Structure formats: structure tokens, C-alpha cells
Image (cartoon, rainbow, N blue to C red):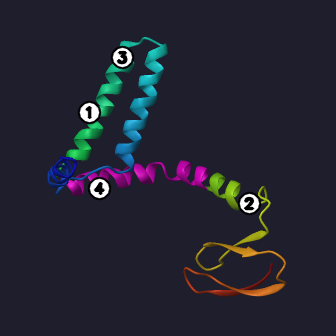
Amino acid sequence: MKQNFKQRMLQFMQGRYGVDQLSGFLIWTAVVIAVITLFVRIPLLQIVTWILIIYAYVRIFSKNTTKRYAQNQKFLDATWGIRKFFADIKYRIKYGKQTTEPYRIYKCRKCGQKIRIPKGKGKIMITCPKCKYQFKKKS
């Protein structure tokens, strides 16, 4: 029964766009607005919630993948700065000076890739895993 349902869902979703970052953002925004409407009874917010949910599911089930991809790319381009800001904070929390891990973080001069190097190894040659550029740094 479970396998049969899964097969039917996979068959139904074949050729459809599916969930992307914009659809996920729309659904999470609708959830946040729905929680707000639990405390603040504004009918307009309920309507906005339903519009966001319906639009997200129209995008998910759409067969016009090129148009949905273009919309998602515009969304990603528009939110790049915000996403980068939070990704940098997350990275600094995980690997930055706030941690007690014995690592140093260097940036490749050629491609900008961040590279984590163990501390206390003296001067070493670092090879960028992305572009294979080599440079010497003190660890």
C-alpha cells in the first residue's frame, strides 16, 4: 500500500517542477503569517496566507519548468546579499575565531575558496581544493 502510493506520487510528479528555494520561501512565509494571524485577527493576513500557499503549490505542480526556473533564479539573485550574510555568520560560528578548534581559515587568492588548515604546523604549502592554486602560509 505504502509502496503503491509512493509509486503513484513519483509518477504524478514526473515532468513537474517540484520544490525549489522560492516555493520553500513562500510556504515558510505563509506559515509565519498563519502563526501571526493566530494572535492578531486580521482577515487580510489570512487571505495573504492562502494566496501564498496556493501560489507555492501551483509552482510546485507546474509543468512549465523553464519559467519556474527563471523565477527561482530571479529570487535567488534578489536575495543573494541576505543569504550570503547569514551563510557567513553560520560559517564564522562553525569555523571562525569563536570556536575552540585548532584551525586557521585562509582564502585562496585565485578563486576565493575558504580553506581550513590545522594550527601549529609552521609554514606550509596550501593547495586550494577548488582551483589547485598553491600558496605558502603560516599555520
Question: Mark 1 and 4 residues: CB-CB less than 8 Å, in contact?
Answer: no
Q: Which residue is mark 4?
A: 69
Of circles 3 and 1, which is in front? 1
Asked which secondary structure carries label 1, the reply is helix
Q: What separation in Å lies between label 3 and label 4 (alpha carbons)?
A: 30 Å
Q: Which residues are magenta?
A: 64-87
Q: What separation in Å lies between label 3 and label 1 (alpha carbons)?
A: 15 Å
Counting from the top left corner in percent of width and height, residue 110 is at 61, 80
**In the rendered structure, which amino acid carries the disc numbered 4?**
Tyr
**Where 44 falls versus 10 (above or below)?**
above
What residue is rendered at 80% in x and 78% in y?
139
Magenta-drawn stretch contains 50: no
**In the rendered structure, which amino acid carries the disc numbered 2?**
Gly
What residue is rendered at 44% in x and 54% in y?
77
Task: Tally the marks.
Answer: 4
Counting from the top left corner in percent of width and height, residue 130 is at 55, 79
Q: Which residue is mark 1?
A: 54
Write down the quadrant of residue 126 in the picture: bottom right
The disc label shown at residue 44, or none: 3
